Amino acid sequence: MAGQIPQHFIDDLLAKVDIVDVIDKRVTLKKSGSNYSACCPFHNEKTPSFTVSQTKQFYHCFGCSANGNAIGFLMEYEGMHFVDAIESLADSVGLEVPRNAQAKQVRDDSKPLYTLMESIAAWYQSELRKSPEAIDYLKARGLSGETAKRFCIGYVPDGWDGLLTHFPGEEAAMIKTGMLIQGDGGKRPYQRFRKRIMFPIRDRRGRVIGFGGRVLDNQEPKYLNSPETPLFHKGSELYGLYEARKSAQDAAAAIVVEGYMDVVALAQHGIDNAVATLGTAANQQHSEALFRVVPNIIFCFDGDRAGRAAAWRALTATLPCLQDGHDAHFLFLPDGEDPDSVVKAGGAAGFRDLMSTRIPIIDYLYQHLASELDMTSIGGKATLAEKAKPLLASIPTGVYKQLALQRLEALIGLSLGSKPAAPQPAAPQRPASPSRAPSGKDSGLTPMSRAVLLCLQFPQVVSTVPADDFDINPQLPGADVLLKLIGYCDSDPQMSTARLLERFRDGRSHDYLIKLATKPYYPDGRDIDSEGAVSEFAHCISRLRERSRQRLADKVELSARTGLLGLRRR
């Protein structure tokens, strides 16, 4: 991911961005000693365990272990891709993301299109206020003005050239964004949407990328979406995800429904974590996008044949996303009902009661496969196992996959080789000596790991050790990472924890470095101060030099013995 953008730019960006400002715009932070704290935005808690270090430019939750820099926070909190997070941060501090000529041209071409789509959405909203017919329609559907405003719902009057009149000179751009259709034989372009309630579709960054339009009467098509454009790819977008993101995170779940009005009607009744596919079946891209925001997806479908067929497609698309920590459920509505009608009849309480009937994805998998089998027979059980195996194979390796296989074993009464996770014995706790403060040597970390930890948490310690003292054998386990860290710190006196970790984002050691960046130095849970860090780092480097010299001496001795043995054999 990082390879798409030069490392020097990422360094410069993280040096200019203040993570406290980035997070405080989204989560209210309070000063707590030298750091800032809040209730974690990634899991429900009453006592704040989420801390942000301005010095390290790094956040960490002691409750759920979420951590990272400003880029990682936007990816986790906003559900952004890496490049989107970089672009968002760059925009906030007035930097231009460097790109190759082709990528820069695409971005330059797209920027005015986003601006145009936002202006069109604003015009649709102004037209709604002028249309008693459209207002009456929304009121009849039970929507308040506040809900319409929240989703920026608008209205496009009847006619063929309203957009051309209100946006002169934008004809080519409006054709490119699908808002106009080019007339046959060189005739004047005309509006795609006419006399419809208009629902702006936003991307993960909140930019308008397309529209969905619903007729006010029973004409067909009832719903009309923007076509595929440079901005809009309906197979990878979800209506309402931008608006629902925070509520979905708070609820730790997103509800996937089928239509715009379902999303809006649920929001009207306080159920704010619903999203909708855009006229396509739920696919793996949808599930991946949602799992970047929440740990659980609830697919809500009609209980009829079409609804169950759609549910099965969603199931097969979601199985590859079920790594440990992710889950999915299916909610089937009574015949003839949709979320809009259910919530209108029974309110939020009625819909939540119905939610209690949702079925876990693995249960639905086996229910569906067994529905036409005789599960009292050997043949039926064997067929179930045969059908289930390729589906289970698509689940990522982990505890979730093992448990799904165990469920199948229970159904057929035969072991298929699953291995229950062995309980891990608790690590013995070694009490600190009361006669002295515990040192890093008691932390269970090797001198190499302690040196890496100090480099990460206090990059400036590198400048306190003479360069000649870093004569460490690169063959020592972990030396390659330590020497890289030392080189990065030595090249930039202003290096921070966040910037160091970013350089290892795509490397094998990233997860290990993250743990060390958040680990207390002392075994009793205390952090080390900067003065102690200088002393301990010098001690660790001294130990590593001794080990390097010893390894060299051992190698020379072994070489000499080998040579002597060879002479004797002659």
Image (cartoon, grey):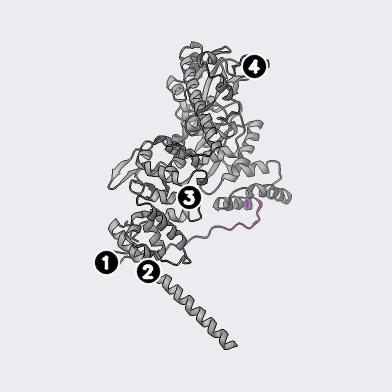
Task: Give the labeled residue for mark 2.
Answer: 543
Q: Position of residue 7 (x, y in %)?
A: 46, 47
Q: Residues within 10 Å of mark 2 (few under 14, many from 20)?
A: some
Foreground label between 3 and 1: 3
Q: In the image, what residue type sits under mark 1?
A: Arg
Q: Main secondary structure of the magenta part?
A: loop
Q: Is residue 5 left or right of residue 26?
A: right
Q: Is residue 568 above or below residue 381?
A: below
Circles 4, 3 touching at the beta carbon (< 8 Å)? no
Task: Give the labeled residue for mark 3.
Answer: 505
Q: Which residue range is magenta in the image?
A: 410-419
Q: In the image, what residue type sits under mark 4?
A: Gly
Q: In the image, what residue type sits under mark 2?
A: Arg
State which quadrant residue 277 falls in.
top right
The residue lying at 52 percent from left, 33 percent from top is: 107
Mark closer to the chain start, 3 or 1: 1
Q: Is residue 559 left or right of residue 546?
A: right
Mark closer to the chain start, 3 or 2: 3
For the residue pair 102 and 150, the one nearer the viewer reads as: 102
Q: Residues within 10 Å of mark 4 (few under 14, many from 20)?
A: few
Label 4's element? loop
Cα distance, mark 4 to mark 3? 50 Å
Circles 3, 2 touching at the beta carbon (< 8 Å)? no
The number of callouts visible is: 4
Q: Position of residue 379 (x, y in %)?
A: 74, 50
Task: Give the labeled residue for mark 1.
Answer: 436
Q: In the image, what residue type sits under mark 3?
A: Arg
Circles 1, 2 touching at the beta carbon (< 8 Å)? no
Task: Give the labeled residue for mark 4.
Answer: 183
Cα distance, mark 3 to mark 1? 38 Å
